[in-house]
Every structure is written in C-alpha cells, then in structure tokens.
Image: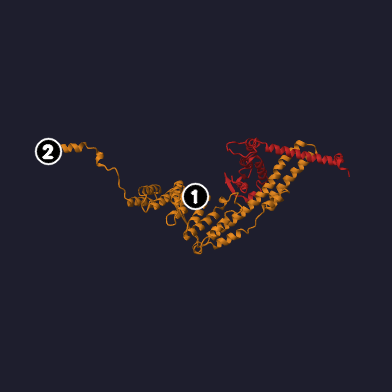
Amino acid sequence: MLPRHDKWRDPVFFKGAHFFLRVKVATAVFLVLIFFSPAFSQDKDPSSDHLPHMIQFYQKYISPVDGQRCPMYPSCSQYIRNSIHKHGLLMGWVMGADRLVRCGRDEARLSTPIWIKGKKHIYDPVENNDFFWSDK
Amino acid sequence: MNRRLCRVICLILLFLPVKAFCADTVIVDAKIQYELANTLFAEKDFSAAAHEYIRFFHLFPDHEKSPEARYQAGVCFFYAGMLTDAARHFEKISASFSDSGFAPDALFKLSEVYLAMDNPARAASVLRDLVTLTQNPDVKDKACFTLGWLLLDRAGDLGSSNNFKTYPVQEAQKYFSLISESGRQKYPIEQTVTSLAQLSQIRQKNPSLAGILSIIPGGGFLYCERYQDALVSFLLNSTLILAAYKSFENDNDFLGGAISFVEAGFYSGNIYGSVASAHKYNKNSQEKAIDNLKQTYQTRPDTMSFHAGPVTDGFALMFKTSF
C-alpha cells in the first residue's frame, strides 16, 4: 500500500479523484447557473415573464410540427411554464422533470379525466402537485 | 257688485299657481308599503320586492317589521342573483347579534350566499361565528350540523397547504360532537360520526419515507403504488447517470456536464414526485372515504333536503329525498 503522500502518484487513485473533481465542478457550475439566473427569483409581478427561451421555442416551432400528443392537461411544456412562473426556475425545473416522468402513465389511472375538443386528457395542473407546500 | 266680486275672485283663482294646491309631503302607510313588498315577493319579482322592502325600512326605521324587511330584502337579492347586495344586507342584520332577532337566520343565509359565491371558506367562517355567538341550543345544533357537512362537502376546496394533513375532517368531527342529545334525534349523525372516526384509520403513505426511498430512483413511486412511474424513473435516471459517468470517463467533459445538468433535474424530480405522490395518495384516500360517507348519508331513507337559489336564467327550487 502506498504511503498517504504518495496516493496522488497512484494512477487509479488519481483517475478516480480527477473524475469526482470534474463531477463537483460540473455540479457547481450547474448550481451557479441556476442561482444567478434572473429567473431564479419567484415572480412577484405576473406581467414579468422570465421564462427560458427553450420552452417558448419548443412551443412555437417544434410542438406544432410534432403535433399535440401530450395526454395531459395542461401539456407538459405548459405545465413547466406554469410551474416556473409560479415557483421560479429551480422548483419549476424540478416539478417539470417530475411531470415528464409521470406523463401519461399512472397519472391516467389516478387523476381526473377531462375532455377537450372531444379528446380525453388527464387533468394535472400545478396546483395538484404543490398543494402540500404552497398556498399560492 | 256681486257680479264684479265674482269676476275678481275668478281672476284670482285663474292666476293662482298650480303648486299652491299641491302638498309637499306624501303620507305613506307602513302596512300598505309592506303589503306591496310582500305582493311583489309572492309574484317572484324579487328585484322590485327588494327595493320595496328597502323603501320600507328607510321610511319606517322604528317599525317593528323593519328588521324583517331588511332580512327579506337580503332574501330577495339572493333569489334575484344579486349576491353582493344580499351579503351586504345579511351582514348588517348580523352586525348586532341577538338570538331573539333575525340575526341567526341572517347568518345562515349569509353562509348560503357565500357558498353561492363559491367562497366556502367564508361560508364556514360565518357558521363558526354563529356557533360561538348563539345561546339558543336549536340554532347551535343546526349551525353545527350545517357547518359539519359544509366542511365535509367542500373539503377539497377548504384544505390548504397549512391544514391539508388534518383536512377539514377533524373540524367536522368537532362540530358534529357539539350537537346536543335532543339535536341528535333531529339530525341523524351517529353513522356519520362513526364513519368519520374510521377515516383516521384509513391506510396512508408516509411522505418522508417516500422521499427517503426515492434515493434509489423510482423507490418512492414504488412505495406509493405507482409502478409504471417507478419503472420509468429508475430506467431514466440510471441511464442518465451511466451516460454522464461514461462521458466523464471518456474525457468528454462538456457532454458529461450537460447530461449531469439534465440528470440533476430528473433525480430531484424523482424525489419531489415521490413525496408529492404520497401526499396525493393520502388526499385521494380521504376524498374517496368522504365521498362514500356522503353517499351513505344521502341514501338514508330518513334524509331529505330542500334547496332554493338563483340559476342562470331565473330561480330554482329543489326538493330531494330518497324513496
């Protein structure tokens, strides 16, 4: 076994430590991006709309071509917009990722169905998923 | 001479202003005014009746029927669908609360008005005040019974993030228990109280445990009986973690960072979704139990109800009973 000060000379140990260092740097960059984003602060003024351009781009250009295939109401992209608008970028992103996982599966069995233009949708607004911590 | 005098008198009468013959005040009889309002009410011209009742208590503020007129004005506004005006009149009656007057009835009506305005929280608040203020056991029993069912009926609307755990069920239990022995014969609640006691024993999921189990992606969903979500969450998260690991291992830092960014969201979403699923499971269980309770109560042969209220294009009366 190598002495403690010689551990960094061990290629296996060095590679592993280097890997975790890079993961830490990537996580730190991610957190800095999130926390210093202007959209991180929760919207006090409903007129201000600091939504990520990616969602707007998706809704404007990709979704019409791709077709409205989301079985949920509001659709996943609209749900993420709503959750970001209501709780800020960090919680909005977390809630949006959760929604993408739940989209159209067990939620279809558990949530209330609604009919829009003759098509059945699963009603799952933001309020159904934040009632236990938010009164907004 | 006489003819000349007659001509002078005729001239004077001719040029006298017409107003000289008119009185400045009109004497209105309280009885006639009240009958007019009652007639309009009987004819279901509620808007006109309301204004005649208002005229009555403005013209005869000290008349013995003045409080009744104000109450009737509120009822008329309610039936005419003018809910804000109805609430204003009922609030004025109940401002000086007394068991002997119209205040208890006004508070019952006020709670109906708030329910019609889709404000169950305020309707419940009015009935809570009535339970506190009244000394009359009959009024108290009726208020407790009405409030208990209001809390159960609108439990979904009344639950907020502050009290969603206790839900309004425990409060309903409290008010049902306040009904006196004589009131229990009038309001059949034994079965309801027993069923409510069983509500606390329904199977629930622990949100904290769901959160801890979701450290392994999908574990929390599995605990909350969401098997498909659990599988998707596990596969998605494990694939992204593996992809990020491989990217960093192959010195592809940018790709690794991008995948880590996405994975961080999905992993957090997995924990959040598990906790939320446990809460939703508990809420749904309780709502189902309350619905069963309501159905049991509504199908009892000794229960009947009478409802009146405004509809889109008029006024509707509904009598409901089991047979």
* Mark 1 surroundings: few (<14), some (14-19) or many (≥20) residues within 10 A: many
Q: Amino acid at mark 2?
A: Arg
Judge left or right: residue B243 versus residue B119.
right
* First in residue order: circle 2 vs circle 1: 2
Chain letter for the part of the structure drawn in red: A
Badge 2 element: helix
Whether residue B242 can be seen here = yes
The three-letter code of the residue at mark 1 reads: Tyr
Instruction: State the hue of chain B.
Output: orange
**Viewer-nearest residue: B316 or B210:** B210
Which residue is labeled 2 in the image?
B3
Q: Quadrant where the C terminus of chain A lies?
A: top right
User: Which quadrant of the rendered structure holds the N terminus of chain A?
Assistant: top right
| x then y, percent, for residue B25 | 30, 44
- For residue B114, the mark is 1
Horizontal side of residue B205 vs B305, given as left or right: right
